[in-house]
Amino acid sequence: MSLMAKLKKNSKLQSSVLSESEFFSETEYVDTGVPMMNVALSGKLDGGLTPGLTVLAGPSKHFKTSFALKMAAAYLRAKPDAVVLFYDSEFGSPQSYFETFGIDTDRVLHTPVTDAEQLKFDLVNQLDQLNKTDDVIIVIDSIGNLASKKELEDAMNEKSVADMSRAKALKGLFRMVTPYLAMKDIPLLAINHTYKEIGLFPKDIVGGGTGIYYSANNIWIIGRRQNKTGTEITGYDFVIKVEKSRYTKEQSKIPISVSWEGGINEMSGLLDVAMAGGFVVKPSNGWYSKAGEEKKYREKELDEEFWRDVLADPAFQAYVRDAYSIGTSLAEELDFEVEGESD
């Protein structure tokens, strides 16, 4: 018996030779339907959502829950038997909100939670009972609004004391669930808040302590900028800043346009990248053309049909990977200003 075989036999855990391990097989991506959201998640246009923890952080009314539901809807489309496990501490997402994103609410298990410990106990129990073949996506809305059990008890007992247990409880929560997410191929989307760092040039800090940073595969800090027609606000560009990622270059900024009338513009964010790479040119003010073509388009005409050939171009796909994937530097040239940013 070889030494490797002997070690495998002696282990009481699920051990395997690393080259044959099922935990390091090819990553499965779920296409969100928004190419630049795929890039923010995976560094690739044809990538998307992966198993593990993704944190969507930002101020109120910054489209965080909508991004999460967009991803959850994509997951349900890709996996016909999948369900959403929705932990709710804010109660700001009625049934109609899910239906707006095409989510069948019969496939959503709604679980109200009041404190971090309650969430921890239920979530760990759910994950422990699941198998690798179970298709489940977890959404927590939100981490930022969760109290600790001690904080609630102090309020009930009319104690006005500082609560030092919340960050510890959240760190323990994510420390416990992270192995389950990886071993059972489960994506978890956690909505979170941000606060401003104290200093001359304050930066957005993700709330909840360091545990979230350590455990997350992806952390987005979401900013926004207004879209106007004259003086009328017609929507927003919600700018995804990749705070942390295992796949995408950190500090990349990716704008996703949302209008009051049309919702998410699924092709948004592509124009800046395509022009930077020379795949789309601007022959005259207000007009755009595909590189090597004479036909001109107004910006409002840059629809899915316009982008179809560009997205299918292997050279453009490679350019985007080089621009945004880990280990490259081209994304530094693609910068966007966001409301409230001072740098």
Image: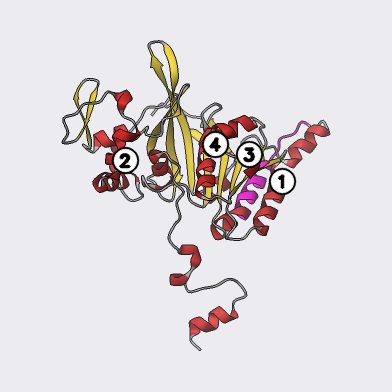
Precedes in sequence: disc 1 or disc 3: 3
Q: Residue 45 falls in which quadrant of the image?
A: top left
Horizontal arrangement in the rendering, residue 167 relative to residue 339 (left or right): right
Percent from the top left, x then y, of residue 158? 82, 30
Q: Residue under circle 4?
A: 102
Q: Of marks 2 and 1, which one's residue comes earlier in the chain? A: 1
Q: On screen, 133 above or below 197?
A: below
Q: Is residue 183 left or right of residue 343?
A: right
Type of the residue with mark 2: Ala
Q: Amino acid at mark 3?
A: Thr
SS for dot 1: helix
Quarter of the image containing the C terminus? Answer: top left
Q: Quick one: SS at disc 3? A: helix
Residue drawn at (47%, 33%) of the image:
222
Tell me if residue 276 comes above or below residue 227 in the rendering: below
* Count of numbered circles in the view: 4
| Disc 3 target residue | 105
Sequence-first disc among 4 and 2: 4
Q: Residue at x 31, y 26 (%)?
A: 301
Q: Is residue 120 magenta?
A: no
As drawn, 232 above or below 160: above
Secondary structure found at label 2: helix
Q: Residues within 10 Å of mark 2 (few under 14, many from 20)?
A: many
Is 223 on the left-hand or right-hand side of 267? right
Residue 17: x and y in percent read: 48, 74
From the image, tell me which residue sits under label 1.
117
Comparing labels 1 and 3, the label whose residue is closer to the camera? 3
* Most distant residue in the top direction: 231
Cβ atoms under marks 1 and 3 closer than 8 Å: no
Residue 330 occupies quadrant: top left
Which region of the structure is painted magenta?
A: 160-176
For mark 3, does the 10 Å Cα neighbourhood hold few (<14), some (14 to 19), or many (20 or more) residues? some
